[in-house]
Amino acid sequence: MKYLSDCLFLFIWILYAPVESTSHGLRRHCDLSTPVCLRKLVQDVVPFFVNGIPERGISSLDPLTVENLNIVLSGGIAIDIHEGFTRGLRKCHVDSARNIDGTHYEVKLSCNLLIKGKYKSKGQLLMFAIDAEGDSTIKCKDLKMTATFELVPITKSDGKQYMKIQDFNSTHDFEGKVNFHLTNLFPGNPEMSEFVLKFLNENWRLVVEEFGGPFIEFGVKSVLNNVERIFDQIPALELAQMFIN
Ligand SMILES: *[C@@H]1O[C@H](CO)[C@@H](O)[C@H](O)[C@H]1NC(C)=O
């Protein structure tokens, strides 16, 4: 029951904190103005936002389906990912969460992600000319994300209060290793394919710094989209009650 009350209090607190932080008389076992307490609450609600609400058309983020992602990266290399998915968002660890001031928050996460799909790629990848398609598996360990955003209560035409993310920034850092497994990088040339794959893995940091950005952006957009749609569709108090039912 502690979990449920935490979730309920989180939303009530988020709803009223910008207006009045203590005078509404809510009491709980940990002080929500402390980062320790807030971190725990954010950690507790991660699975809810990741699971989405399929009956309201808000799909699950774990796995996050990547039906068709077309990206043109620096140097002009085009990468299409299809029949893909990303796993692991449900288990992201909330490293810290804090109220910066008023309605501004900062949340830091660490995630281990597995990205799988069919790829098709053409162009210059570092010093290699690529024209290939095959299967790809990318493992990303200890990806650190920092999100800062403004969370404001708004009253909609139904007279109810909803939460809205007003402003959002994020940064990321690849702390752990990234491992690539790409089949058929050089069609008909397994030795060269193996050689280039080995090179990419040995130089994974260079690769993710050069090419990782748009993929992270796609992930962040997907997560933000879920959070925004959940906030937009479900009144704040109803959201809190959903954790009780
Ligand atoms: C996002 O970044 C912009 C530009 O640096 C800044 O002005 C804004 O305050 C930031 N917003 C948040 C919520 O951190």
Image (tube, rainbow, N blue to C red):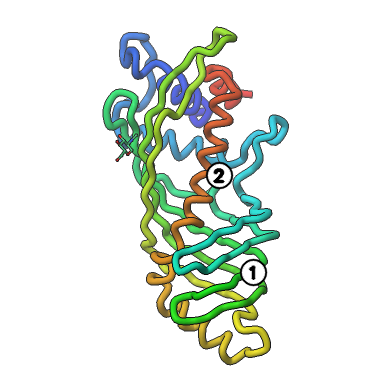
Depth order, front residue of 36/75: 75
Label 2 neighbourhood size at 10 Å, few (<14), some (14-19), many (20+)?
Answer: some
Is label 1 within 8 A of ligand 1 (CB to nearest ligand atom)? no
Q: Secondary structure at mark 2?
A: helix
Q: CA distance from mark 2 to mark 1?
A: 22 Å
Instruction: Give above or below for 68 relative to 5.
Output: below
Instruction: Give above or below for 172 relative to 207.
Output: above
Q: Secondary structure at mark 1?
A: strand
Instruction: Give above or below for 97 relative to 207.
Output: above
| Residue 14, quarter of picture | top left
- Whether residues under marks 2 and 1 lie with C-beta atoms below 8 angstroms apart, the answer is no
Measuring 65% from the left and 35% from the top, which residue is drawn there? Answer: 58
Q: Which residue is mark 1?
A: 120
- Residue 24: % across, % down: 37, 9
Q: Which residue is mark 2?
A: 222
- Residue 112: % across, % down: 49, 58
Residue 169 relative to residue 111: left or right: left
Three-letter amino acid code at the position of disc 1:
Lys
Three-letter amino acid code at the position of disc 2:
Ser
Measuring 69% from the left and 34% from the top, which residue is drawn there? Answer: 57
Q: In terms of sequence position, does the residue under pointer 2 or pointer 1 come before the other?
A: 1
Label 1 neighbourhood size at 10 Å, few (<14), some (14-19), many (20+)?
Answer: some
Depth order, front residue of 228/10: 228
Measuring 31% from the left and 14% from the top, which residue is drawn there? Answer: 22
